[in-house]
Image (cartoon, rainbow, N blue to C red):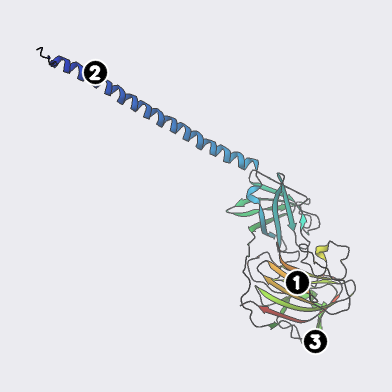
Amino acid sequence: MCRRRTFRPTPLVFSVANAALTREVKVKTETKRFLILLFLMLLMVCGCSHRGGSRESASSSAAADPIKPFLGRWDLTVKTPAREYPSWIEVSEAQGQAKVLVVGFGGSATPAASAQAENGTIKLSMPPNEDYDGCVQMTGKLVNGQLAGTATGPKGAAWQWTGRRAPALNDQAVAKWGKPIRLFNGRNLAGWKFADPSRAGVWKVEHHILVKDGSGSELITTAKFWNFKLHVEFNDGPKSNSGVYLRGRDEVQIETDSAADPASQHQGGIYGFITPDPEQPRRDNVWQTYDITLVGRTVTVVQNGVTVVDHREIPGITGGALDSNEGSPGPIYLQGTEEGRVAFRNIVITPAM
C-alpha cells in the first residue's frame, strides 16, 4: 500500500506567503484611502462651485431686476417749507419696466410721467396735475426698509420725503357694532373743527341743516374712528362739489360738476380709485343718502338704497387726505375747498366694538 505523503510547509514558505498577503492588504488600503480622498476633493470642488454659482446667480438676479425691492404700495410724507403733505405711490412692474401710480396732495391716482430704478435708487417724474408745485423729480433710496429721498423742481426747490410700506389692513368682519353717535347736532358745530379757520365763513347752520356755500375750509370731526358704519344725508346744488372723507384719508365723492371727469371721480365713487357701479343719475337740489361701511381697507357704499361700491378694497389715500398714516384711526371730514352749495343733515356714525 502506498501511503499518501503529507506536505508540511516550511517556515520560509509561511514567511513568503504572509509578506505577499501583507503587501496586498496594504495596496488595497492605500487605494481605498486614495479613492476616499479623491471623492472628498471632488465634493469640495462641486460645493464651492455651487456656492459661487448661487452668489453669482443672486447678484445677476438683483442686477437684472433692480425695481424688485421697491415693489408695492408706499405711504409718503413730503416735507415742504410750508408744511408736511401726504402722498402715496404704488410701484409695479410690467414686461421689465417700472410702473408707478401716484396720488399727490390733491389729485387722483395718476401714472408717473416716468419711473426707473438702478443701483438701489428709484427715480420718478411726478404727474404735473398732482399738486407738487413744480417739484416734479423725486429720487429715493431704501434705508432700513423705508424710503427716503428728495424732490426737486425746475426752480431748484428741494423737499425731503419719506415713505413707509402701506399696511395691509386685513381686518375681519365686524362681529358687533357699538352705539350710533350723532356727529352733527343740528344746532352748531360742536365736535367739529376747521382745517383753515380763516376760510370758515362758507359753513353755517340753517334750520338744523349744515350748509357749505362756496370754496373754503375743510370741516373735520374732533373725534377719530377706525372701523365704522356712516350714514350721511346730502343735497348738492347745480355745479357743486364736496366729499365725505373716511378716516380723513379716503374720499367718497359728492358732485354735480364732474360728468366729464373719469368715472372714478363721479358721485358715489372712491375718488380716483373705485368707480360707482351702477352709477346713479346726478340730481341737484334733491336730498340723497349715503350708507358707508368701512372695515380695514374694505368699503361698501350704498347710495339711496342702491349698492354702488360693494366690498371693494381701497388701495391707498385719495387726494386731499389729512395724512398718510393709514394704520391709524382718523376723523370724518366734509370737503369745503370745492365750489358750489352742498347741504348735510343726519350725520350718524356707528363704530365697531
Name the image quarter holding residue 27. top left
In the image, taking residue 282 as reference, residue 331 lies left or right, namely left
Distance between the alpha carbons at the discs numbered 2 and 3: 119 Å
Q: Nearer the viewer, mark 1 or mark 2?
A: 2
Residue carrying label 2:
20
* Residue 222 tag number: none
Horizontal and vertical percent position of residue 163: 65, 57
Q: Residues within 10 Å of mark 2 (few under 14, many from 20)?
A: few
* x, y percent for residue 173: 63, 71
Instruction: Determine the image quadrant of residue 101.
Output: bottom right
Tag 1 residue: 301
Q: Looking at numbered disc 1 in the image, what kind of residue is underneath it?
A: Val
Q: CA distance from mark 3 to mark 1?
A: 25 Å
On the image, the x and y values in percent for residue 320 come to 75, 66
Hey, which quadrant is residue 246 in on the image?
bottom right
Disc 3 crowd, CA 10 A, few/some/many (<14, 14-19, 20+): some
Q: Secondary structure at mark 1?
A: strand
Q: Nearer the viewer, residue 160 or 347?
A: 347
Q: Secondary structure at mark 3?
A: loop
Q: Residue at x 31, y 24 (%)?
A: 28
**Disc nearer the start of the sequence (3/1):** 3
Mark in front: 3 vs 1: 1
What amino acid does circle 2 point to?
Answer: Ala
Residue in view at x 44 percent, y 30 percent: 42
Q: Earlier in the sequence, mark 1 or mark 2?
A: 2
User: Where is 5 relative to 269, above or below?
Assistant: above
**Mark with earlier residue (2, 3):** 2
Q: For the N terminus, give its image quadrant.
A: top left
Secondary element at tag 2: helix
| Residue at which label 3 appears | 208
Residue at x-position 69% and y-position 74%:
331
Mark 3 belongs to which amino acid?
A: His
